[in-house]
Image (spheres, grey):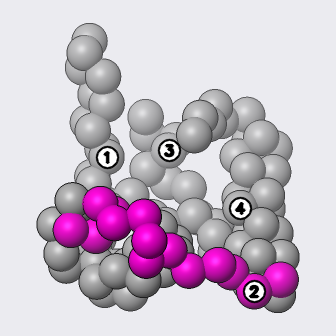
């Protein structure tokens, strides 16, 4: 857990607090006022409740080819970094 909290990479949002016990793990990150990629794709306000933000599937926004390539590269570079450090990653 200490290794995860010390990760520094331009495409991995830093962890502010991390705690684990026999039931699982809790990580806390600072709120990003611009929202997440999911907020961007749904055209939603990051401050709205989950069901309001993501409940309507008709408001989805398609990424341009340029944005799709940019975000894909950033995700893959982040995963490559974690793999190189021997750190497990999931979804």
**Going from the N terminus, do you reach mark 1 or mark 2 first?**
1
| SS assignment at label 2 | loop
Q: Tags 4 and 1 in contact by the CB under 8 Å rule?
A: no
Task: Report the residue at 34% width, 66% height from top.
Answer: 56
Disc 3 designates what residue? 4
Please report the bounds of the magenta region as a residue range. 52-65
**Going from the N terminus, do you reach mark 4 or mark 3 first?**
3
| SS assignment at label 4 | helix
Query: Separation of disc 4 and disc 1 at Cα?
Result: 19 Å
**Going from the N terminus, do you reach mark 2 or mark 3 first?**
3
Disc 4 designates what residue? 75
> Is 36 positioned to the left or the right of 65 in the image?
left
Q: Nearer the viewer, mark 4 or mark 1?
A: 4
Q: Residues within 10 Å of mark 4 (few under 14, many from 20)?
A: few
> Is 88 positioned to the left or the right of 3 in the image?
right
Q: Nearer the viewer, mark 2 or mark 3?
A: 2
Q: Nearer the viewer, mark 1 or mark 2?
A: 2
Q: Nearer the viewer, mark 3 or mark 1?
A: 1
Query: Separation of disc 4 and disc 3 at Cα?
Result: 17 Å
Q: Residues within 10 Å of mark 2 (few under 14, many from 20)?
A: few
Q: Tags 3 and 1 in contact by the CB under 8 Å rule?
A: yes
Q: Nearer the viewer, mark 4 or mark 2?
A: 2
Whether 6 is drawn above or below 42: the answer is: above
Label placed on residue 27? 1
**Nearer the observer, 49 or 8:** 49
Q: Tags 2 and 3 in contact by the CB under 8 Å rule?
A: no
**Going from the N terminus, do you reach mark 4 or mark 1 first?**
1
């Amino acid at each position: 857990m200490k290794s995860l909290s010390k990760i520094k990479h331009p495409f991995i949002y830093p962890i502010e607090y991390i705690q684990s016990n026999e039931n699982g793990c809790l990580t806390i990150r600072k709120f990003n006022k611009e929202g997440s990629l999911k907020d961007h794709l749904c055209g939603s306000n990051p401050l709205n409740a989950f069901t309001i933000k993501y409940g309507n599937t008709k408001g989805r926004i398609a990424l341009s080819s340029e944005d799709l390539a940019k975000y894909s590269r950033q995700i893959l570079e982040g995963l490559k970094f974690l793999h190189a450090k021997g750190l497990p990653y999931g979804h």
